[in-house]
Image (spheres, helix red, strand yellow):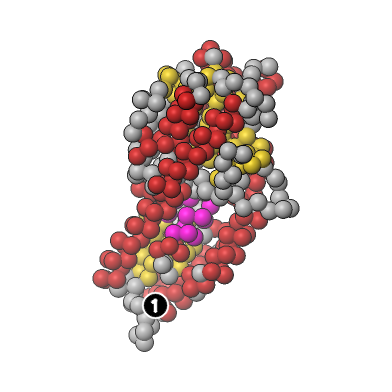
Amino acid sequence: MTNSPLPRLAVLTSGGDAPGMNPAVRAVVGVASALGAEVIGVRRGYQGLIEGDGAPLSPRDVDGWNRRGGSILGSSRCAAFRAPDGRMTALRQLQSWGVGGLIVIGGNGSLTGARLLGALAESEGVPLCVVGLPASIDNDLACTSLSIGVDTALNTIVEACDRILDTASSHARTFVVEVMGRDCGYLAMTAAVAAGADGVIFREAGLDEDEILTQLEQIIRRAYDPAGGKHRVLVVKAEGVDVSSQRLKTLLDARLAASNLPVETRVSVLGHVVRGGAPSATDRLIAGRLGHAAVRAIERGMSDIMCGWHVLRRPDGPQPTVFDLDPYVTFWPLETVLTETDRIVDGTSEVTRWRVRLLREAAPFLSA
Ligand code: F6P
């Protein structure tokens, strides 16, 4: 680590928005300003960067951002930035603003872009520190126990499940509630535990269509048992499961009819509802602490890293740098983050295996 003075910064939010992105930007602006540096807020993620759509942000500008959902700066999934030309335009834009440090707040694709931009700056001899902050409701990023937005999304899902259980109980129905998460079952698994669901379906379990249906039938049979059943079922399903929720309902209804189990089923897809809303207190705090760490990292000349939140480090795994000013924060090379993230997504990561093992161990009532 070096002690270079803090350069002018730029900050952007990219990819799917996540509750807590605004508090992260607010923290970056507040901490940088206290250290005497200016921050350019880039609108609409990498798209805005390519188009030069940014303006300085003062602490007064970001006042009140802590309690706002979505991304006030705006976000995008930018196809142009995936091409070398687009990244070169973005780099020249940062140079023209006199920016020496870029903070990218986003998920897997956004941090991949951050890494490529950092590499381009290095090869062009442009002094630019690039630091990523993990933000995605999916919690599919490695090297952080939580990404910004996960806690709020989880709370939203649990509240929705509580409501659905009210109506499920009233009508003695079975509900399959589908939640976002892309290929990652984290939100479904944790929401199922927190909501007290009867079952959970997620891609990492590796079940085929028939096995899923068999499990569901067993759960339903048990729940509607005349001798002591509870006469309603809530199953949380991750969007990454190959079989669609509607198809599952159709096949399940056919099975139930064939088994002479007259249970009414309904599907509720929560979709983007889960991504919106004011950030929870936990998300605001995590975003604030990570935003602070990102600014301090750039002040020290660190680059090509992501700031992770409260990671349980394995002695045999990759080792990060612990942030001396906040031991809950660790700095990880982006390369490590992205390699490990691929493993979380394809299910070979120790983190994924541990999540599945723990679910089976601590919540055995969630499987048939
Ligand atoms: O990555 C966040 C996420 O919300 C995923 O859970 C979901 O699969 C995807 O983004 C939805 O993307 P879009 O908003 O582009 O439809």
Q: Is residue 336 above or below residue 115?
A: below
Q: Read off the magenta span.
A: 179-191
Q: Callout 1, which amino acid?
A: Ala
Q: Is residue 183 magenta?
A: yes
Name the quadrant of the N terminus. Answer: top right
Q: Is residue 7 left or right of residue 47?
A: right
- Residue 281 falls within the magenta-colored stretch: no
Asked if 4 appears above or below 154 in the picture, the reply is above
- 365 vs 5, left or right, is left
The correct choice, above or below, for 207 with respect to 97 in the image is below
- Taking the view exactly as shown, the residue that stands out farthest to the bottom is 227
Residue 89, given in percent of the width and then of the height, sits at: 55, 17
Mark 1 sits on what residue?
A: 223
Q: Residue 239, image x and y in percent?
A: 47, 53
Residue at 53%, 52% in the rendered image:
184
State the SS at label 1. Answer: helix
Residue 171 visible to the viewer: yes
Answer with the quarter of the image where residue 247 lies. Answer: bottom left
Q: Could you say where residue 350 lies in the image, as x and y percent from the top left? A: 66, 56
Which sits in the foreground, 57 or 275? 57
160 or 235: nearer the eye? 160
Name the residue rendered at 59%, 20% in the picture: 5
Residue extending farthest to the top is 96
User: Which residue is rendered at x = 33% and y = 62% of the image?
Assistant: 162
Q: Residue at x 52, y 72 (%)?
A: 364
Camera-side residue of 166 and 237: 166
- The residue at the far right in this view is 316
Q: Position of residue 42 (x, y in %)?
A: 45, 24
